[in-house]
Amino acid sequence: MKSKNTYILLLFCIILSSVFVLTKKETGKFDIGAESAILVDATTGKILFAKNAEKKLPPASMTKMMTEYLVLEAIENGQISWETTTQISEYAYTISSNPNFAGVQLNKEKLYTVRELYEAMAIHSDNGTTITLAELIAGTEGEFVKKMNAKAKEIGLTEYKFVNATGLSNRDLGENYPDGTAPDADNILSARSAALLAKKLIQDFPQALEIASIGQDELDSVQVSNSNLMLEEQSSEYDYLKYEGVDGLKTGWTAEAGYCFTGTAMQNGHRLISVVMKTSSKDSRFTETRKLFDYGFRKL
């Protein structure tokens, strides 16, 4: 009997060992072609995958998630409404007129609604409209940056530094870089902090996802496309990048940041949030995100 029990125990240990070796082997094969990456269960906050997730890197236009949060908060608090109108400043016009930056050339004479400005920012990553919203809420972009950093501290981000509302490098802004920041400064986020910001944004303001999931929009009679090519609403030319359940959230690119993407997808009632930072190409930020989502939804 003793011999039989010993045999059973030995067999159990062999099976258990095999499971751990297999798990380790599978994890070893799974890598993400990004400087930094993270995958999080949006409901529990559990980290399902991480690679250099605490590394501080420029987030490019993923910065705009914080701008979106503060705009939606200002609407909720009654400071502004979706129908509030404003004109763009000379600074915002200068940025919007630069073909090197994402956006649509804005009209200095037109009154734009907050909804028009927000949708251009969230869908097309427009920089001029982002600056206009920051100035509307705080008076100047410099004052808005203070709000960004205060909110980051409030919601518990650990690796961050905001120096402007758009995610451009301050070097790109020339003499218009915000007061209180350095002329050559960049925004800083880790993948972990970007994921937490995304989680907070979509939990506190579900309408952020409703807008982020719009594939095509129009501003000043100009058709603008969503920079998130994983959306199922995208045109058929991007079928190879689309992913079931993706409904957000924010792309980013600068020379310093590389290609970045904070993504979110829901399948069978489970929502995942992913971040990839400093990938090598426009497509790779989406193909690497696909790897994360495939991995995460298999684990759930």
Image: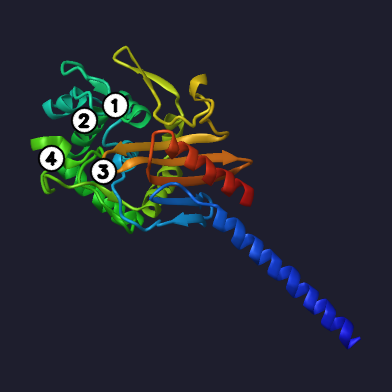
Percent position of residue 49, x then y: 51, 55
Q: Do the residues labelled 3 and 1 touch (CB within 8 Å)?
A: no
Which mark sits nearer the N-terminus, 2 or 3?
A: 2
Q: Which of marks 3 and 1 is nearer the N terminus?
A: 1
Give the residue at mark 4: 177
Tag 1: amino acid: Leu
In the picture as drawn, the residue positioned furthest to the top comes out as: 221
Q: Name the residue under label 3.
A: 256
The residues tagged by marks 4 and 2 sit, at their Cα atoms, a distance apart of 14 Å
Instruction: Please tell me which residue is depicted at 45% across the width and 29% down the height of the picture.
Output: 229
| Residue depicted at 31% across the width and 37% down the height | 253
Numbered disc 3: secondary structure: loop
In the image, farthest residue toward the right: 1
- Quadrant (top left, top right, bottom left, bottom right) of the N terminus: bottom right
122 to 39, vertically: above or below: above
Instruction: Report how far apart the C-alphas of labels 2 and 3 lie in the structure.
Output: 24 Å
- Percent position (x, y) of residue 70? 30, 41
Q: Is residue 110 left or right of residue 220?
A: left
SS at badge 1:
helix
Disc 4 residue type (three-letter): Tyr
Q: On the rendered structure, is 268 left or right of 130?
A: right
Q: Looking at the image, do the residues carrying marks 2 and 1 touch, with CB atoms under 8 Å apart?
A: yes
Quadrant in the picture for residue 276: top left
Residue located beneath label 1 in the image: 117
